[in-house]
Amino acid sequence: MADPIPVPVGILRLPRGPDSSGSRGFSRDWRPGANSRDRDNSRDSAALQSARAALRERFLRLLGRARGKRARFRLWNGLRVLAEFGAADVQSGAFQVDSLRTPLGVQGAALLRCGDVLEFSF
């Protein structure tokens, strides 16, 4: 999981909001393709979408290969737990684990909310 990310991800910089004089910020010409800057933004958007799709595919492949492996989870509250990785429901944001070892004992099966997980490794 320590492999470098092969696809560079650009930084999205939003324009400043319009000031009272309207001299800077968002363009008053809202038509798509009105100038070359709009075309550059659409290319940047396509590159960003492509990079995000590649990263998402890589993450989902990792989750597919992780089934049944020992995993270490670090939660936002600083707690570290061990478990056998079962599955991930990315839509609802939960990891299903078996044999969850916590300071209070072992839980046969559990769901860890993705929002509670700071990091995990195998």
Image: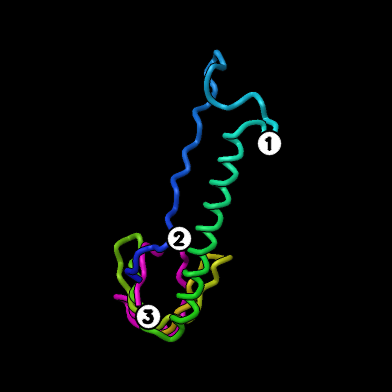
The CA span between labels 1 and 2 is 37 Å
Q: How many marks?
A: 3
Instruction: Report the residue marked by disc 1.
Output: 32
Q: Residue at x 57, y 27 (%)?
A: 26
- Residue 27 lies, with reference to residue 5, above or below; the image says above
Of labels 1 and 2, the one closer to you: 1
> Mark 1: few, some, or many residues within 10 Å (few <14, many ≥20)?
few
Q: Amino acid at mark 3?
A: Ala
Amino acid type at mark 1 = Pro
The residue that label 2 is drawn on is 115
Q: Earlier in the sequence, mark 2 or mark 3?
A: 3
Q: Where is residue 71 shown, x and y percent of the image?
A: 36, 78
Quarter of the rendering containing residue 82: bottom left
Give the Cα distance between marks 2 and 3.
17 Å
Q: Residues within 10 Å of mark 2 (few under 14, many from 20)?
A: few
Labels 1, 3: front one: 1
Residue 111 on the magenta span:
yes
13, above or below 121, in the image: above
